[in-house]
Image (tube, rainbow, N blue to C red):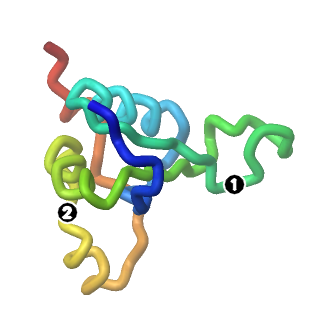
Amino acid sequence: MDRPRNRKQVRLTVLENEPLARMAEQRLYQESIPCVVRSLGAGPGGWGAVTNLPHAIYVTASDEMRARQVLDLCPAEIEEREGHQSYSRFHPSTMIIA
């Protein structure tokens, strides 16, 4: 499937640390949803381990709703209405490994 390179990316969610973000990333890839994981802290080269910093997951706008379903996330409208940018409810125990 050839995807155009100019698709808008949106932040799907923020996870507490890199291991959780990488597990969510793998879950999305299993469903053929491309994504990008970015550290929200100092990143590599900063003080301490980057694995303990929050990480955001970005997907294309066209994949956002399906990605939210795969990771069992609240719709973006609810998060905006409640006015909080809390960490995701995604937890590895909610993943089903096939």
What x and y, as percent, mark residue 16? 49, 48
Could you tell me which residue is drawn at 19 percent across and 34 percent down? 94
Image mark for residue 41: 1
At label 1, the amino acid type is Gly
CA neighbours of label 2 inside 10 A, class few (<14), some (14 to 19), many (20+) = some
Query: Which element is circle 2 on?
Result: loop
- Left-right relation of 65 to 89: left
Quadrant hosting residue 82: bottom left
3D distance between C-alphas at marks 1 and 2: 24 Å
What x and y, as percent, mark residue 40? 63, 55
Quadrant hosting residue 93: top left
The answer to whether residue 87 of the structure is visible from this angle is no
Would you place residue 48 above or below residue 83 in this image? above
Work out whether residue 34 or residue 95 is closer to the camera in this orientation and state it. 34
Could you tell me which residue is drawn at 18 percent across and 57 percent down? 65
* Residue ID for mark 2: 74
Could you tell me which residue is drawn at 69 percent across and 39 percent down? 50
Could you tell me which residue is drawn at 51 percent across and 42 percent down? 37
Q: Earlier in the sequence, mark 1 or mark 2?
A: 1
